[in-house]
Image (cartoon, rainbow, N blue to C red):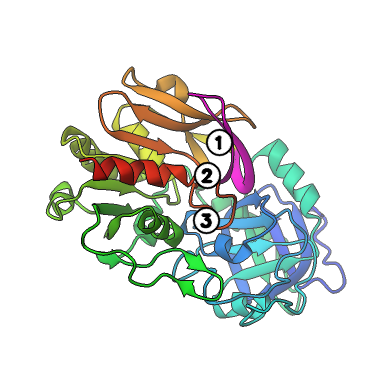
Amino acid sequence: MADAKSPTVPKGATGVLVLADGTAIFGRGFGAVGDAVGEVCFNTAMTGYQEVMTDPSYAGQIVTFTFPHIGNVGTNLDDVEADNPFALGCVVRQDVTEPSNFRNVEPFDQWMKEQGRIGLSGVDTRALTRMIRVKGAPNAVIVHDPDGAFDIAALTEKAKAWPGLEGMDLAIEVTAKESRAWKDGPWKLGFGYGVGEAGDERPHVVAIDYGAKNNIFRNLVKAGAKVTVLPATATYDEVMALKPAGVFLSNGPGDPAATGEYAVPVIAKLLEADLPIFGICLGHQLLGLAVGAKTIKMHQGHRGANHPVKRLEDGLVEITSMNHGFAVDSDTLPANAKATHVSLFDGSNCGLELTDRKAFSVQYHPEASPGPQDSFYLFERFVAGLAKG
C-alpha cells in the first residue's frame, strides 16, 4: 500500500484501488479495462462469487472477497441472481486461475470482462478487511489499466467527490422495469431450474422488487406460492389490482430512507389493508420505516454466508447469509413492532414482527445463494399463512 504522497507504481502493477484518504493499493487488474467509483465492502463467504457479483444489493459497491481463491470454478449460466452483475468490481487475493469444475462455461476473468466489471488481484485482502473494520467502509476508485498509468492524485479526488451510499436511492436503478409472472422453482443438479412450477391454484404473492435476488422468487415458489413481480415504484392500486393473498418486500441496494420516500407510503397503505407482508433485507428496513422506526448506516455492514442470528422467541441460532450496510434501529421500534431476531456479531436488529398486523421481516437472506439453508422456514411460514386466509 502507498499513500498519495508516494504514488510510485510497483513493477507489474496493472490495477489499483485508491481510497478517498489517498491510500493506493496496487495489484494486477483483470476483467474490464477502466475505472469505477463506489463504496468498498468485504464479503466473508467461501463460495458463490458469481451470485455475489450479480446480487442487485451490491449496486454501488466494490466487493473485497476474504476467501483467497476466487474464480477457481469459473462461471456458468445458472449461478446468477439477476440478468446483469451489479457489483462494480471485486478485489481478490490470488490471481484468477484456469477454472476446474464440470459446470464451468467460461473463466471468471473473461466473464468479468464481458460484463464490464473490474477485478483487482494480488491484494492483501486480510489487511484491507481489517482496515475496513477499523475505519469503516471507504469510498474508492478501482482501476484496471494494462499500461499501469495511474494518476493517484486525480483518482483520490474522484473517490472524495463520490457522495457515498447514505441518502442514495439505488433501488430505482436496479428494479425490474415492468411486471412479470414468476414461474421457476429452485435449482436441482442435473435438471436446472424447476421451470413452470407455480400454478394458478396457489396463493398469489405480489413481490415488490427493490433489487431482488432471483432465488427469493424461487423459494417462494418452492414454498407453494404463485408470484407476480412488480417494480419498486408500484403503487398501492397497482398491487391491489392483482388481488394478492400477500405481499413480499424484496432486498435491494442503497439507503432505505431514500427509497422509502416512495416505498413507505405504499407499504403503510398495504398495512392498513391488513394484507400479510413478508420483507427481506431492504424490505425489512422499509417495513420498519413504515411503522415509524428509524434506520442507521452501519460502520462496516454485514456481508457473508456465516452470520449467526439468534431467534429471540426460543433462543435458536441460525447461520445466515447477509448483505446490508444499513440496519433498523431497535431503539426506535414502536410498541406494536417487536424484535424477533438479533445478530450475535454486534447485537443489531435482524428481524421484526407486528403485533397488530400479519407482517414480519428479517434483515438477513433466508434464500441464501450463496449460504446456508437454516432459514427457509420463513418462506414456509409466510405461504402457510396465506393458505389459511
* Stretch in magenta: 300-324
Q: Residue 324 carries which label?
A: 2
Instruction: Look at the numbered discs 2 and 3 and tell me whether their residues touch, using CB distance below 8 Å.
Output: no
Along the viewing direction, whichever of 380 and 1 lies nearer the viewer: 380
Work out how far the residue at label 2 is from the one at label 3, CA to CA, in angstroms.
9 Å
Q: How crowded is mark 3: few (under 14 residues within 10 Å), some or many (20 or more)?
A: many
Work out how far the residue at label 3 is from the one at label 1, CA to CA, in angstroms.
15 Å
Residue linked to disc 1: 298
Residue reaching furthest to the right: 11
Height in image: 20 above or below 143?
A: above
Height in image: 243 above or below 30?
A: above
Name the residue at 31% across, 21% down.
Answer: 336
Q: Residues within 10 Å of mark 2 (few under 14, many from 20)?
A: many
Residue reaching furthest to the top: 335
Image-quadrant location for residue 332:
top left
Residue linked to disc 3: 58
Residue 126 location in percent, x, y?
A: 79, 50
